[in-house]
Amino acid sequence: MAKTKTTFFCQNCGAQYAKWQGQCTSCKEWNTIAEEVIQKAEKSSWKINDSSGGTKNRTAKPQRISEISTQSEARLNTKNNELNRVLGGGLVPGSLTLLGGEPGIGKSTLMLKIALQLPYKTLYVSGEESAQQIKMRAERIQPVSENCYILTETKTQNIFRNIEEIEPDIVVIDSIQTLHTDNIESSAGSISQIRETTTELIKFAKETATPVILIGHITKDGNIAGPKILEHMVDTVLQFEGDRNHIYRILRANKNRFGSTNELGIYEMQGSGLREVSNPSEILISKNDEELSGTAISATLEGMRPLMIEIQALVSSAVYGTPQRSATGYNAKRLNMILAVLEKRAGFKLGAKDVFLNITGGITVDDPAIDLAVVAAVLSSNIDMAIDKQMCFAAEVGLAGEVRPVNRVEQRILEAEKLGFTSIVISKYCKIPKHSFHINIIKVAKVHDVVHHLFG
């Protein structure tokens, strides 16, 4: 038996030290270094047996890049359009995907639904729930699939033994923090265990061209628990976001070696599980028949997907000496900048008034193209005059009070036209391609022009 060794790891970033010290020199955090028992293994848990009963030794040989074939790397369709969009078209064979999110946000529900929908043989490994609990949730989501296998195990050696018997096309691990291997003597969830078990799964995925999906816990800071190197080791890092008080969930890609990181998927949490939202613009805009002041619609972009979002503003006289500035789903500092522009360039006295701003649907938007809609909503609430419900906005506001153009304005115009809006307000300096739009395009150059057009 190999001699047991101990070393010190930073629980925040995973840096390794020979002895204990108060501050981690890598991440500059204090009191995060802890001692863990490690033991180097003589051989890995994963191995491929040949027909003669021996073990294959795969030795990589250098190849010319022009001779490498990529035709066999066809993506696997997950039968989930939102996940396919975020991944860039589907799962790549041999890839490792890490899915993180807050407790109770729906990570396990999403992965179980995908495992039940897949037309491929799928092994769902759970270290947190029993097989009976998973079966109860599966019956609520949809009829049980014949291609989905459930395994409740946390030891990687036993997991690989079952993988050799079943030979699945896709493996889902829930969660990586619950796995442990005999090659490391530290407890499950420690830095060394997470790193070693992930290494074994990477070796398995690359040698067998089997995609592996890992579910990961997050810390109170919102980062994925474990060493930071975990995010470097995997191919794709997905973040499942949303407020548990709202029914909508957003899936983003923080890292993607096989596609763009600008795409996002939207889901709706229901009693029967997560439902894909194919047209998010309809759910983000309230269906009010009455005309209400302080409401404006903006055409924004999330990745390649255009969205129509509703912005609500409330301007009232300040009760206390210092007026309040509050923004939900929008940058509060940018709101203060826009209010200063309205005060300086447009002559509106908002310095002694409370201003509250909200983006409906519980989403957060950082697209500068919603600036003009924020201006319209604030001014509408200030003078208590409603804006036409069939009008939307897509432009950035500068410090000089000018209305600046935004990128991909044609997609925004087409989305507004598709949803039935009759007019859209954009910058005068936007370069619109020659196209016959069935929507009234209003071009403005300064904030004064917007005020004149909306309120006369």
Image (cartoon, grey):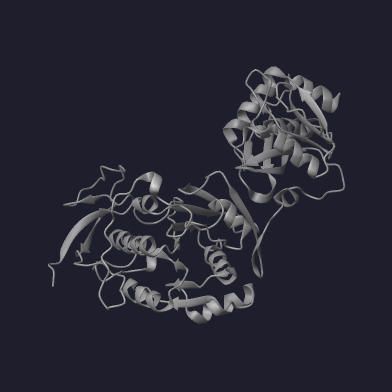
Asked if residue 423 is positioned above or below residue 185 in the image, the reply reads above
Which residue is painted at 70% across and 26% down in the image? 350
Q: Is residue 146 left or right of residue 36?
A: right
Residue 410 visible (yes or no): yes
Query: Which quarter of the rendering shows the N terminus?
Result: bottom left
Residue 397 found in image quarter? top right
**x, y percentage for residue 8?**
21, 55
Residue 318 visible (yes or no): no
Q: Is residue 401 left or right of residue 221?
A: right
Furthest residue to the bottom?
132
**x, y percentage for residue 401?**
68, 20
**x, y percentage for residue 289?**
87, 48
Q: Is residue 299 left or right of residue 105?
A: right
Which residue is painted at 72% across and 52% down in the image? 279
Q: Nearer the viewer, residue 247 or 378?
A: 247
Query: Which quarter of the rendering shows the C terminus?
Result: top right
Asked if residue 92 is positioned above or below residue 315 in the image, the reply reads below
Which residue is painted at 61% across and 44% down in the image? 364
In this rendering, the count of numbered labels is: 0
Asked if residue 200 is positioned above or below residue 306 in the image, the reply reads below
**x, y percentage for residue 9?**
25, 54
Q: Nearer the viewer, residue 308 or 245?
A: 308
